[in-house]
Amino acid sequence: MPFELVHPEWLLLTPALFALFLLLRQRVRFLQHLHIDRISLYLPFDVGKSDSQVSGQKTRLLNWILLFLMSLSMAQPVVKTKIVLPPENTKDIFFIIDTSVGMSIKDYSINKQELDRLSLVKALLIQFLEQLNNNRTGVMVYAEQAYVLTPLTMDKELAITNIKRVRPALAGRRNNLEKALTTYLEYSKTLDSKPTVVVLSQGANLEGSGKITEVVERFKSNDTRLHFIGLGSESSRRASSNKLIYDPIDKNLLSGLAVTTGGDFFWAGDESNLETTLLKIKSAETEYVTNKDIVFLQQYYLWPMYGVLLLLLMSQANVCFRRFKQ
């Protein structure tokens, strides 16, 4: 069991203190020689010592041991136990969710039950977040306006609770993707990391599309990749819920925006494809962070201090015994 000293410099004081004491005692003896008898200086084992040479050597040895133990206690001996932690796979993930009116179209199904786009996104995101560990997650919703619903947080329960509250047309009716990306860029200035940004959008009837390319170039210059997940049909279709015809997803636009930043575009043609897409993004963006080793210090400074106390008790017992004999 290897010992280490936290403050080894204290051991160097042992000979220095003893030499200082001897020097002072020689000075005291010189003053006593001048008949100044009241001046005296003792180490613990000097009291009542005999004049024999053997006894004097024992006294000096005990005093050396006493000083050494005191210095050793001050040097703080410890035994270090290091626990090496395995690396963690982690990456901040920020979801930007389209809540425009088009997300209310029921063109997905789970267990043969029609499901609107936003409900599907919410269900799979919640399932995805429940499986995450050691990741910070953030959520933004957008339509005509954009709002940070959940700032980056390790509290995945908070993110899940907020996702459950998302409704179609929460931030307006129309799909203004440029507004969402600009809002995120402003928010990202407050972050201490560069999260993976995942945009889940129906990708149709985009407002501000003329400026989207310029905004995405800012993501590229910031070395932030955008991943797009497209939702909805590839062709125009009539929604059975409200008898309205909605435009198909603009896959080329979303794919081009993703490629510009070095990200990927995925089309969630069905619910299983969307789930697989989320897992692919997580796997592609995983970073392995080496944890700092945990070091436990087992303190042993009390043991030499116990030795000091024992020697002092022996010294006092020795004095009492000699006085009793006299």
Image: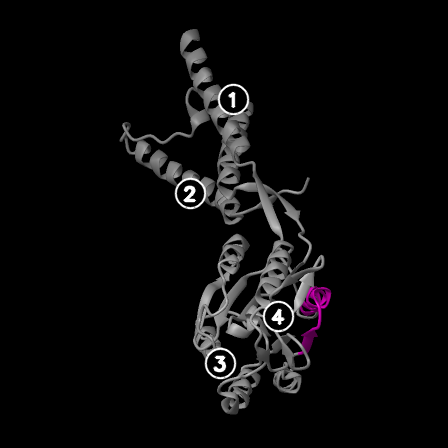
Q: Which residue is mark 1?
A: 52
Q: Secondary structure at mark 3?
A: loop
The reply to whether dot 3 and dot 4 touch (C-beta < 8 Å) is no
In the rendered structure, the answer to whether residue 123 lies left or right of residue 174 reads right
In the rendered structure, the answer to whether residue 198 lies left or right of residue 40 reads right
Q: Secondary structure at mark 4?
A: loop
The tag on residue 240 is 4
Q: Secondary structure at mark 1?
A: loop
Q: Main secondary structure of the magenta part?
A: helix
Could you tell me how far apart the alpha carbons at marks 1 and 2 are, in whole angstroms? 24 Å
Q: Secondary structure at mark 2?
A: helix
In the foreground, 42 or 240: 240
In the foreground, 158 or 113: 113
Instruction: State which tag comes first along the sequence, 4 or 2.
Output: 2
Q: Disc 3 residue type?
A: Asn
- Mark in the foreground, 1 or 4: 4
Q: Say if the magenta span includes residue 274.
A: yes
Q: Which residue is mark 2?
A: 20
Q: Residues within 10 Å of mark 2 (few under 14, many from 20)?
A: few
Instruction: State which tag comes first along the sequence, 1 or 3.
Output: 1
Q: Which residues are magenta?
A: 264-281
- Name the spot of residue 244 as percent of width and height, x first: 57, 77
Could you tell me how far apart the alpha carbons at marks 1 and 3 are, in whole angstroms? 102 Å
- Name the spot of residue 68 as percent of width and height, x first: 52, 37
Q: Disc 4 residue type?
A: Ser
Could you tell me how far apart the alpha carbons at marks 1 and 4 are, in whole angstroms? 114 Å
Could you tell me how far apart the alpha carbons at marks 4 and 2 are, in whole angstroms? 99 Å
